[in-house]
Amino acid sequence: MKILVCISNVPDTTTKITFTNDNTQFNTAGVQFIVNPYDEIALSRAIELCEGGKGTVTVINVGESATEPTIRKALAIGADDAVRVNGTPRDAYFTAFQIAEYAKANEFDIILCGRESIDYNGSQVAAMIGEFLDIPSISIIKKLDYDGTTATIEREIEGGKEVVTVTGKFVASCAEGTAEPKIPNMRGIMSARTKPLTVVEAVAVDELAKVTKFETPAPRGTVKLINADTAEELIGLLHSEAKVI
Amino acid sequence: MSVLVYVEQVDGKFKKSVFEAVSYAKAIADSQSTNLTAISIGNVAEGDLKELGKYGASKVLNVANDQLKTFVNQAYASVIAEAAKKENADLVVLSNSFSGKGLAPRIAVKLKAGLVDGAVEIPTTEAGFSVKKTAFSGKAFAVTTLTSANKVIALNPNAFGVKENVVDASIESFSPEVKSTDLTAIVKEIVRATDKVSLPDAELVVSAGRGLKGPENWGMIEELADLLGAATACSKPVSDADWRPHSEHVGQTGIAISPNLYIAIGISGAIQHLAGVSSSKVIVVINKDPEAPFFKVADYGIVGDAFEVVPKIIAALKAHKG
Ligand SMILES: Cc1cc2nc3c(=O)[nH]c(=O)nc-3n(C[C@H](O)[C@H](O)[C@H](O)COP(=O)(O)OP(=O)(O)OC[C@H]3O[C@@H](n4cnc5c(N)ncnc54)[C@H](O)[C@@H]3O)c2cc1C
Ligand SMILES: Nc1ncnc2c1ncn2[C@@H]1O[C@H](COP(=O)(O)O)[C@@H](O)[C@H]1O
């Protein structure tokens, strides 16, 4: 079994988000980049499925050379090898196209993504890969079992879950629950340095979408404090002042 | 040119988020002086389809095909893309629901359309077709400009609101061919709690954190939520400890929500938590620590012990409701 896990390189979750160049660019100064937390979950599940010699896990990232430390982190967690498609991920269409091209040339049974990248929150890449390859895509899953041919998957729906089975190749985007994120151990970190990381060049694709400006949310007014002894006043305020109940 | 809106049915019914997507699509269609067509897939009664006219859909394509009763995104994407071609629609709008997130990217690839997901405002056209969307888990917004001829927008729940715009909806049946290769993913089971308000759609949310000490103390949280008709949510450590299900976890690595009211009880307000909830319209924070960072983004705050404060609020709410 061969599993391909798509890894995006995102700012650490504690990052204070600021912009430069008249709010047209994300300010990366001093920002630490990490493996997208959902991709860590996808990778951890892929490693579990391949345990005991049942298969191999390849991680793929579309990005510039600056993303290599993040790719090495994924190798340290336990991926067998890695691919970087050398290009600047502009829109999800570009990114998904590159991954689909690689997957066409290199035959994978399963392709796993995270539910969304925590920077642009697109939730787009996984289903786009599915469409480019004309195979099923299941978005926002929280459980994945695989018997070698058929996968049984739970996906999140509003107020519940749906159980889906797929036989044959598929793409899924993983959310919490799919696996406990694995933490790299010393051996993993050491071996990551020597695991293969192949670089391939991106294919030219038309650009369909681009971010032209960022905005930060308007600051809130100051908090109105209510005395705990008269906490019941809250209900009146929510009703007649805030008008939300 | 026209606008097509996909109206997602759940057990044959439309939810509020659908009327919101129709209202939003109608506003765009009006600004472009064009028509709005809706497409429904699955078995929906004629009366419910007609109701879409109330929000501005002048035509409804009804795909009643037994093979498509439950959602399979591959097949649904094919049907919607076919409908867009038939209607000569250059813009497809849908709700950014769990299913919508799986569907929109496939439609976009089929139509070679630029996609904006998580849209929060009507597009502007002064400098290219641009749509504001949430980014960095709610810590910022990104204005995305679509440069393609075809476009797809997935609208965030509660971002636009439901707006009436009554027209008479004509209903037309539509039966595109469905490829068997589009139906290989098989839905085995659907489990849905129908008595509860679902979190992503909820207008009111009551949320609690580690300050509640243990799962046995959630009774008052559920009672408050039930009285308000609110959904319940929690912080990450709470779902990590299995006090509450993962589906309730909000924040940067959980669900991002923007309800009208978010009540946070015993939650400190860590940056990753705020990321998913800070676009709520009104925030109430109940925390015994006056220094809790959550107070900085709150509209109303009560410094006190949740175990004393919440029962008081419940009693007041009961009195308020009479
Ligand atoms: C990569 C990453 C991603 C993360 N993603 C998320 C996420 O998506 N969502 C999320 O929520 N967190 C997330 N976190 C965790 C986040 O950093 C915080 O640890 C978490 O939000 C804290 O949860 P809490 O407020 O419930 O608990 P605590 O921080 O322990 O706060 C408990 C609060 O309860 C108050 N309290 C205690 N007793 C009472 C009482 N009797 N009455 C009233 N108040 C009381 C305390 O004063 C305190 O403020 C993430 C962390 C990382 C590293
Ligand atoms: N540049 C990238 N390289 C590889 N995989 C990516 C990239 N961007 C996004 N992905 C994958 O697609 C998922 C969803 O990303 P997005 O559609 O950007 O929200 C991520 O969790 C990754 O698994």
Image: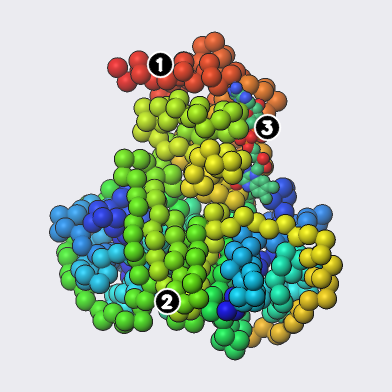
- Given the current orientation, which residue lies at the most extreme top position? A229
Left or right of B44 in this view: A144: right
Residue on which disc 2 sits: A167
Mark 3 and mark 2: Cα distance apart in space = 48 Å
Task: In this rendered view, identify the residue nearer to me: A75 or B230.
Answer: A75
Residue A219, image x and y in percent? Answer: 62, 38
Q: Which mark is residue B315?
A: 1
* Residue behind mark 3: B293
Q: Secondary structure at mark 3?
A: helix
Residue sitting at the far bottom: A105
**Which marked residue is nearer to the observer: mark 1 or mark 3?**
1
Q: Amino acid at mark 2?
A: Thr
SS of the residue under disc 1: helix
What's the amino acid at mark 3? Pro
Q: Is residue B171 left or right of residue A57?
A: left
Q: Which mark is residue A55?
A: none
Residue at x 31% of width, y 40% of height: B195
For residue A216, above or below residue B309:
below
Judged by depth in the image, the label closer to the viewer, 3 or 2, is: 2
Residue B293 percent coordinates (x, y): 68, 32
Q: How far from the left and from the top, in percent, is residue A35? A: 70, 62
Q: Secondary structure at mark 2?
A: strand
Is disc 1 surrounded by few (<14), some (14 to 19) or many (20+) residues within 10 Å? few
Quarter the N terminus of chain A occupies? bottom right
Q: Amino acid at mark 1?
A: Ala
Q: Is residue A239 left or right of residue A172?
A: left
- The residues tagged by marks 1 and 3 sit, at their Cα atoms, a distance apart of 28 Å
Mark 3 and mark 2 residues within 8 Å of each other at the beta carbon: no
Chain of residue at mark 1: B
